[in-house]
């Protein structure tokens, strides 16, 4: 659906101009978030003088455009995450279904302390029984992690937004970014 179709289906529900409070209701956000969207310049507004004083008014078109762009970004983000999951599934094909922290270390290049911190913060889901992490039967080989939970972690926003990446992480990021760019060019986006 393009913006014109979206706009024509939504515009008759709202007046031409709305207040910040009404904008918050339309977008389903709180007023402080609506205020920050205005101050960041994501949704333009203008002031009008009334007998009560200066009043702010926001074009409904601008609100619907912002909402449409957010929906499109979420769709693109979902496609990107699915492409990432497929990429990592392919990369992890040779690994067993239950991984040890040493396997995670080998694949990501991060040290065991970092991996254990991910597990403690529950960013990376470890295999648990009665709220206790299941350790590898081989002494010193670490916690067990399912391949699916590891793939979920690799495709998560947290893992993608790590600031100080290892060389392996940077290499993987370049590879899957190139794959996704090719995917988008084939799709015509």
Image (cartoon, helix red, strand yellow):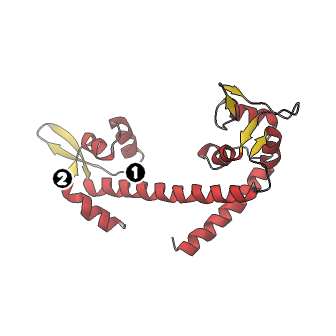
Q: Alpha-carbon neighbours of circle 2 within 10 Å: few (<14), some, or many (≥20)?
A: few
Q: Badge 1 is on which residue?
A: 42
| Residue 127, picture quadrant | top right
Say which mark, if any, is on residue 103.
none
Above or below, comparing residue 72 to residue 103 in the picture: below
In percent of width and height, residue 11 lies at 23, 58
Count of marks, rendered view = 2
| Residue 179, picture quadrant | bottom right
In percent of width and height, residue 27 lies at 33, 46
> For numbered disc 2, what is the local secondary structure?
loop
In percent of width and height, residue 47 lies at 24, 46
> For numbered disc 1, what is the local secondary structure?
loop
Q: Is residue 104 left or right of residue 2?
A: right
| Image point (28%, 58%), residue name | 61
Q: Is residue 30 left or right of residue 78?
A: left
The answer to whether residue 98 of the structure is visible from this angle is yes
| Residue 39, picture quadrant | top left
- Spatial distance from mark 1 to mark 2, Cα to Cα? 20 Å
């Amino acid at each position: 659906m393009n913006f014109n179709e979206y706009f024509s289906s939504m515009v008759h529900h709202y007046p031409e101009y709305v207040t910040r409070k009404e904008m918050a209701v339309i977008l389903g956000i709180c007023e402080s978030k609506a205020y920050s969207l205005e101050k960041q310049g994501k949704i333009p507004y203008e002031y009008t003088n009334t007998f009560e004083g200066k009043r702010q008014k926001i074009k409904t078109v601008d609100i619907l455009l912002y909402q449409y762009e957010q929906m499109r970004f979420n769709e693109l983000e979902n496609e990107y995450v699915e492409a990432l999951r497929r990429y990592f599934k392919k990369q992890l094909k040779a690994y067993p279904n239950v991984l040890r922290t040493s396997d995670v270390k080998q694949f990501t290049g991060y040290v065991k302390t970092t991996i254990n911190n991910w597990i403690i913060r529950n960013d990376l889901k470890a295999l648990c029984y009665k709220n206790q992490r299941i350790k590898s039967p081989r002494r010193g080989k670490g916690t067990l992690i399912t391949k699916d939970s590891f793939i979920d972690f690799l495709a998560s926003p947290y893992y993608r937004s790590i600031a100080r990446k290892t060389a392996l992480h940077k290499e993987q990021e370049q590879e899957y970014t190139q794959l996704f760019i090719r995917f988008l060019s084939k799709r015509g986006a």
